[in-house]
Image (tube, helix red, strand yellow):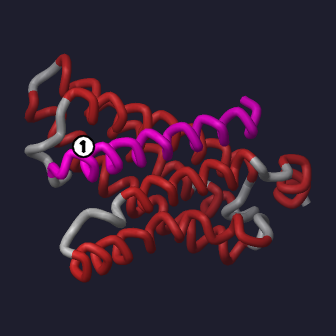
Amino acid sequence: MNTRLLGLMGVLGGAALAAIEIRHLITGVRLNGATIDGVDNVLYGVWGLGMFCAFWAIYQLGATGQNKIMRLAPFIAMIGFAAMAIGSLFSFTGPKTIADVLIGVAWIGILLGTLVTGILALIARVWVGWRKFTPLICILAIPLLIIVGLVTGSQVGDPLFGLSWMLLGYAVLSSNTEQSLQTVRA
């Protein structure tokens, strides 16, 4: 599949996560497992599918380097995002315990996979400029949000988490596919 289309899906996925956070910011309802409703579940599913696509493109672009094992790092995040999308679906159709387990596993895969992909993207130097930092920005947004929340006593910074994922999608969308693939093949 075209990496630009996959990147666009990633941007839309990040926008879905930002929408969840903006929605909770506007309503004043703290975002946690007890306050997630059907709209949130749909948006989390869109985020999962969109980011699955973005990480598939990261794999296709070879952003984590030439080593066959290192190239597999995006699959850790992809498993997490697939579990997020399926868990969100199960929240409507299946037992809530299955949905909760899938979403719990999803967060582990998402965070671990994004961290590993981010470190390898920096080391590999396939992506140049700002793009190579985008997976780590998604991870580093978490402590930033915690600090902003502690300082302000509110969720005002939460939408930045969704925006960081949109930026990752845009990094994929705007990547030079041919240059990346030539680097991987070399």
Q: Is residue 95 above or below residue 24?
A: above
Count of number-bearing discs: 1
Magenta segment boundaries in residue numbering = 1-29
Q: Secondary structure at mark 1?
A: helix
What crowding class fits label 1: few (fewer than 14 Cα within 10 Å), some (14-19), or many (20 or more)? Answer: many
User: Label 1: which residue?
Assistant: 103
Q: Is residue 126 above or below residue 178?
A: below
Is 37 in front, or is 88? 37
Main secondary structure type of the part rendered in magenta: helix
- The quadrant the N terminus occupies is top right
Q: Residue at horizontal 46%, vertical 59%?
A: 113
Identity, as a three-letter code, of the amino acid under mark 1: Ile
Q: Position of residue 92 (x, y in %)?
A: 19, 21
Q: Is residue 164 above or below residue 48?
A: below
Quarter placement of the C terminus: bottom right
Horizontally, residue 136 falls left or right of residue 36, namely right
Residue 83: give x, y in percent of width and height: 34, 38
Residue at x 46%, y 52% (from the top left corner): 77
Residue located 47% across and 68% down the image: 115
- Residue at horizontal 27%, vertical 48%? 26
Q: Position of residue 58 (x, y in %)?
A: 66, 51
Q: Is residue 6 rendered magenta in the image?
A: yes
Q: Is residue 102 magenta?
A: no
Q: Nearer the viewer, residue 128 or 106?
A: 128
